[in-house]
Image (cartoon, grey):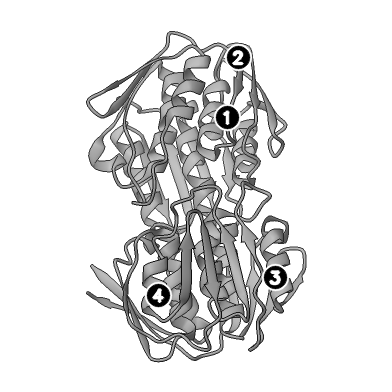
Amino acid sequence: MDKIVVKGGRKLKGRVRIGGAKNAVLPMMAACLLTRGESVIRNVPVLADVITMKKVLERLGARVALRGHTLRVDTSTITDHEAPYELVRTMRASVYVLGPLVASIGKAKVSLPGGCAWGPRPVDLHIRALQELGARIEIDHGYIVAGASVLKGNTVVFSLPSVGATANTMMAAARARGKTIIVNAAREPEIVALADFINRMGGKIRGAGNDTIEVEGRAELSPAEVRVIPDRIEAGTYMIAGAITAGEIELENCVPEHVEVITQKLRQSGVVVEKSRNSIYVRGKRRLESVDVVTAPYPGFPTDMQAQYMSLMTIARGTCVISETVFPDRFTHVPELRRLGANIKIDGNTAHVGYIKRLSGAPVMATDLRASAALVLAGLVAEGETHISRVYHIDRGYEAIEEKLGALGADIKRVPE
């Protein structure tokens, strides 16, 4: 395994290009199973999770080719319906193949998923939604086994707006008989992007981006071509990189509207943020003010930015209160930030982040994807060297992060553990 070594104290300056959204491309890859033939996905980030999903599709019999940032998925040779444990255990998004497989070939066997170690994130909502559409489902020795001679449209009401369950339901409903109405649907931009891709295939989805989505099922769909939207979490991470180092950077190839709540919080803390049509300019300041945050589903403050924001707040004056309402136990990065000198106290689902003049470099361990990014950000401003181990987590969601930060002036390198 590798580790990342960061020597803090350098202001970042320059331009960074934001890649395609991980959380958009993974369901798009699964959606290719709704058709027979070759679909093309462009602006694909080269990430560990993308490679894993590629292997899942290949295991099912698809021919998948990734050249640069263009992915071609040919599903005309699908021969299997099982997504095995050895692949699914590393990535929760593998469960996205469940709905498309049941909808297109009438059966699926998908291992219960793995992924980041923090907190339980059950797939109950996925299962119940497919059952509402007429699928027969049982759990057998760690596998979700599903079957249906035909799926039928229905009204599916979620108890909470789950991105994964909304995506899986949309994909299954796209090939179901009749109309499906999804109530309390997730509103994330990645859901809108998936609906756009399915509509390009000949599907009929209306309302994506709202809390009620209507899907008119189609007997057949056709292969299509799509470009992945920019990754709003990567964009938010680099915005904080500029802010935490009192630097001056410009993000290219991003959608400012997708990070509006992050922009608001940074401005309130004293950071200069200027937006254009597809770029964002960030200029940090030496003196930052604490600003409280409550995580919430989109368009609220994203839980996937909570850890990175906490790193910024460790050097902001005052006391910041961060309430995690999406995944209440998502604080595994706190002990590692404390190793760098951070003043953080946890009370249930709330973190109280006190001001400290400077962080100090130390050996730390990444516990999940976004915690990895938070530790890198803290290392950028800490005195001395910060050694971050288990960085295979960061490769799941950030393409060449050490190269991008290095191009902005950071003293950062990847070395063997």
Rendered image quadrant of residue 16: bottom right
Instruction: Tell me, yes or no, whether the two marked residues, 3 and 1, touch with CB atoms within 8 Å.
Output: no
Q: Residue at x 50, y 30 (%)?
A: 168
Check disc 3: other Cα within 10 Å, few if <14, some if 14-19, many if 20+: many
Q: Write down the residue under mark 2.
A: 154
Decide which of 269, 78 is in the foreground and name it: 269
Q: Amino acid at mark 1?
A: Ser
Q: Disc 4 and disc 2: Cα gap in Å?
A: 49 Å
Tell me whether the residue at label 4 lies in contact with that at label 1, contact meaning CB atoms closer than 8 angstroms: no
For mark 1, what is the residue? 159
For discs 3 and 4, the disc positioned in front in the rendered view: 4
Between circles 2 and 3, the one closer to the viewer is 2
Which one is closest to the eye, mark 2 or mark 1?
1
How far is mark 3 from mark 4, CA to CA?
Answer: 31 Å
Say left or right for 94 vs 261.
left
Residue 119 on image: x %, y %: 39, 47
Q: Are marks 2 and 1 in contact (CB under 8 Å)?
A: no
Q: Amino acid at mark 3?
A: Ile
| Nearest to N terminus: mark 2 or mark 3 | 2
The quarter of the picture where the C terminus appears is bottom left
The residue drawn where x is 36% and y is 55% is 48
Spot the residue most to the top.
149
Return the disc, 4 or 2, that comes first in the chain's sequence. Answer: 2
Of mark 2 and mark 1, the one earlier in the sequence is 2
Q: Where on the picture, by quarter, is residue 415?
A: bottom left
Q: In the image, which disc is placed on residue 280?
A: 3
Residue at label 4? 338
| Three-letter residue code for mark 4 | Arg
Q: Position of residue 176 (x, y in %)?
A: 55, 16
Q: Residue furthest front?
A: 347
Relative to 263, 130 lies left or right: left
Q: Residue at x 54, y 71 (%)?
A: 353
